[in-house]
Image (cartoon, grey):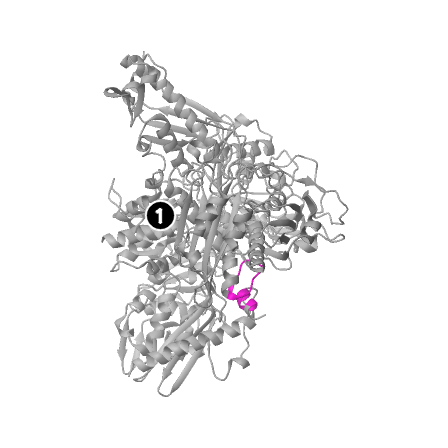
Amino acid sequence: MIPAPTRYARATDLDDALELLAEPDAKAIAGGQSLIPVMKLRIARPSLVVDISRLDLRGVTERDGELHVGPLTTWDELVGSAQLERPALAALVECARGIGDLQVRNLGTIGGSVVHADPASDIPAVLLALGARLRLRSPDGERDLAVSDALVGPFTTALEAQELVTDIAIPVPPQGSGSAYACVEHPASGFALAGAAVLVTPDGETVAFTGIGAAPFVLRDGLADVEIFGDRFAPAEYRRELAGVVAERARTMARERAKADR
Amino acid sequence: MSDVIGVARPRIDAPDKVTGATRYAADGYVHGLLHARPVLASEAHARLRGFDTDAALAVPGVVAVLTAADLPLATTGTDRTSEPLAREEVVFAGQPVALVIAETEASAEDAAELVVVDYEPLDAVVDVEAAMEPGVPLARVVEESDDEGADLESVHAQVDEGQEDDAAEQLSGNVLDRVTREHGDVAAAFAASDVVVEGTFRTPWVYQAYIEPQVCTAWLEPSGALVVSTSTQGSFVTRRELARAFDLPLERVRVIAEPLGGAFGGKFALVEPLAVGAALALRRPVRLVLTRSEDFAATNPASAQVTHLKLGARADGTFTGIEARMIVDRGTNAGWGVEGGTSLLVAGPYRWQAHDLRGYGVQTNRFTFGAYRAPGAPTAAYALESLLDELAQALDLDPIELRLKNAVVEGDVGVSGNPFPTIGAVEVLERLREHPLWAQRNSLPEDEGVGMAAGHWPGAMEPASAICRVDADGTMTVVTSVADMSGVNSGFAVIAAAAFGLRPDQVRVVTADTASAPYAGASGGSKITYTVGPAVLRAAEAAREKLLAAASQELEIAPDDLEVVDGVVQAVGSPDRSITVQEVASKALRFGGRYEPIEGHGGSAQTSGAPSVAAHLSHVRVDRETGEVTVLRHVIAQDVGRALNPALVEGQMLGGAAQGIGWALYEQLDHDEDGRLLTGSFLDYAIPRAEHIPEIDTLIVEVPAPDGPFGAKGIGEAPVVGAPAAVANAVARAAGTRLYELPMTPPRVWKALRS
Amino acid sequence: MPDTVTLVVNGEERSLDVEGRTLLVHALRDGLGLTGAHIGCDTSQCGACTVLVEGRAVKSCTVLAQQADGRAITTIEGLAPDGELHPLQSAFVEHHGLQCGFCTPGIILTAADLLSRGDAPSDEEIRHALRGNLCRCTGYQGIVESIRAVGAAS
């Protein structure tokens, strides 16, 4: 219930944050809605919590055919963002609206959720379907990493210890596109038993899943070849079926939205 | 009086609760307080070999790491009061084995994870049916002493014991109790039936999930008296249990029942022995607030159960025979179980020609069984009412008509062998039948269905007392020992107001502690309104006599010619000749006053019970692709005797129905094969949220209880009993297939649709 | 080595010593004696600890006290001026939105956030907004009625 002992430091700017993260067991905290629960269970035991929540990394802007979402943008801010009110990006808002609950959405951030890398959290599926890219900053400089390359396993990313997300770039889909997110959630935790995000464009469809594997993933061939995770509550056989159902529901909705986007 | 009883009013403690002013048991400041953190067993069954506490003791702020030997217990029983920390044998994963005491909660938690426990694992018994077979390992191997254990069974229900069964059934030593009720020849009854249906129904361990985790603070006064401030359903029963366990004179133990943050049957003498043991050992105040994880693992949820049931009926719908074999998983509770209760209640509020009802209480290495709102009843009703629906279908009879045909009325002899007192089964079913949803049940869209089910709860009785005291300002204070679990205090306020002649806002209700309160039993069993209510009524009447005696002198009018209206004593027919209650009281409560204080004491000892019946309609939709069940609408009709405050009565009906929906669709405590808890938080154990519960229509039916205050009776438990069955019957209709196991989770519904 | 944090609680600046790991709920309850925020779980789900930070509902058990440094915090005790009840508090009393009351402060503050956002919410929106608040006693119906009544009145 009470986290293990830790120190707290508030970063004054990005460089300060990166420097503080040099400590071996330091951890960045943004909204804390993913980190603090695991600290309270004492699964996470950082020696130093680096508070980056007041850095200027919020907001949604459009530039050069891409949408740029600040990693510290909260779910509530995403839901309210006028920039995201288009059929092509509807999956993003649809997903954000359903994440956690009202209190979580007031504090939880999109960047925090992505780097927490829970294999059953919703937003990775949407970012994967939309082909999103992370801009990362470290003391050595900057690099870009596709979300698909960033999520490598349960609660594991390809980010370095001293690396922070400074931007989430989402290519704006062409005219006549639509996206949607559908999931079946665990009645207690609200996490996805199976979630599917679909982007429909004039050139094709992209389907991404969450909740059914070691990490969220983009569907390449068929579901039949994919190894599906199962547990006592929801066995693999059931989740496989669910995956098909949510993909179909998201696909239907995305196609409708694509039509409306002409 | 017509505007006092039967009027919907806000509950009297609402203003304090909505402003955060109410002090719950974890909220009070205590000087010099130490904090406790339990160490819970990680093995389901093991011998306790020893501890390494060096690292824990080295944590700054830690005062002690207590084990069983350190607690000054005087008894060797194995109930949770007598053995709050495991002595030699761990019998369930989650059992407290040590208690860390520290200056802060944080350091106690830091130290608790450093305590090393040496276990010698033993075979864990996890499957309740397998546990019954001769030759299997025993869930408890250390010999139990002959010492008297806790007597908590009587708190919960007035249910007769049935007959102990010594018949030659080869069963293992894990079977702690067998109860049999037989009457007539069931085999012959089935042979003479036109339809016989049977089935096996399974329900899991279910958690009460009160939002306030269990908490207790204990300290010694300079005089050596022990004071216990706790979130409990019963201050007197807690005092009795603590006095017994620690061999203290009753008058040296003072128990204060703090406002309850929910209890539903689970808060009885479970955490107090730990805090008290520590306070006595260390001679310092100790508070134990369980974390939610600890509360999931280490308290006392409701038993898992397997019910084999068989029913017969004639073509005209008359019930013939009922045969039940009900296996109740008591976990580690050697003291009591619900096998007696559930095997009685499985007959429902119906007449049967022959019955053979058996209950088995079986120990396993899973939890300590505890009571949860109508213990043993929802599980019994799930089996019974599911089969009654199958009977109705087989006989092509309307499900409500089928039940009406067999519903008991006053005087009918139940399977207990006793006649039913006044009971509103018929009235409730008739009222339910009128609801528009019932008429719509056959014209619903595909994948939707409406089911119905009835449930009843016998209620309970225990002698009780109350005091009514008028203060110098003319208002009244009602004093009881009652822990207000269901809103009963608001009922006492209107009872006292109506009986005395005050407005309800002129009455306050106080819960006093065991040092000074008049006696009443614990809150539970649906008995407080029915037993303490009459005590309050008589106390108010006694106070009124004092009032009239004094007023009569002041007004020079005979007491019989006076009435009391809204705090004014006035002559009947000439209201201008009057004196206020406040004036009379102030004349009594002063130096040299002429009149006795305006106070009354009242007592009650009910001898006849007051059962309550509640019947439900549930309208569900099944998503065939995912197996998810949505409850679209729910209706509950309940016989409440008399609704002293309809809003509070409806609150019990709504809360019970919602918990029943939880039983039906969402709630299951789960262990792995080694007896380790898999569902130890709200991340895994789903209690219904607002989105899961629909609009619920509440239909209050009033069949006055002859001995209840203004005809009222206990109504807190009946509402949950039939709810899971109604949802199950609705799902059976919507899905076209019946599930024989609760909860009806999406994966289970999905699987049933495909098999 | 404790750190000092300054919280503006119910309009008043309060400074207190906390550890790096101190949760806001403990700072409020133990540090400032504001026990209206209740602790009902340890997995950030029950919402009984909900307070308002800058007018937004947050679970105070899932915020480090130091993260809230300098922020304006409203607890249930500060929702209404002395002696009066906030419309939500009155509504919960009048419309029977509570029984044991343990979840009630958290629910009222979540509702305050919800109602501050615009048009009166539908029942469905109210129920969705209560995802982060568990109640075991009421079946939620009185809660929804109470919030609906305030939404309709404003």
The residue indicated by pointer 1 is: C97
| SS at circle 1 | loop
Front position in the image: B402 or C55 = B402
Segment colored magenta? B735-752
In magenta stretch: residue B736 = yes
Quadrant location of the C terminus of chain B in the rendered image: bottom right
- Identify the subunit bearing mark 1: C
Q: Is residue A170 visible?
A: no
Residue B423 x/y as whole percent: 50, 40
The answer to whether residue A205 is above or below residue A193 is below
Residue A159 in the image: state x and y as whole percent.
43, 74
Q: Which residue sits at x=42%, y=67%?
A: A22
Q: Quadrant of residue B351?
A: top right
Q: Is residue B543 visible in the rendered structure shown here? A: yes
Above or below — where is B456 with respect to B483?
below
In percent of width and height, residue A251 lies at 41, 79
Could you say where residue B30 lies in the image, as x and y percent from the top left? 42, 37
Q: Is residue B669 left or right of residue A84?
A: right
The kind of residue tagged 1 is Gly
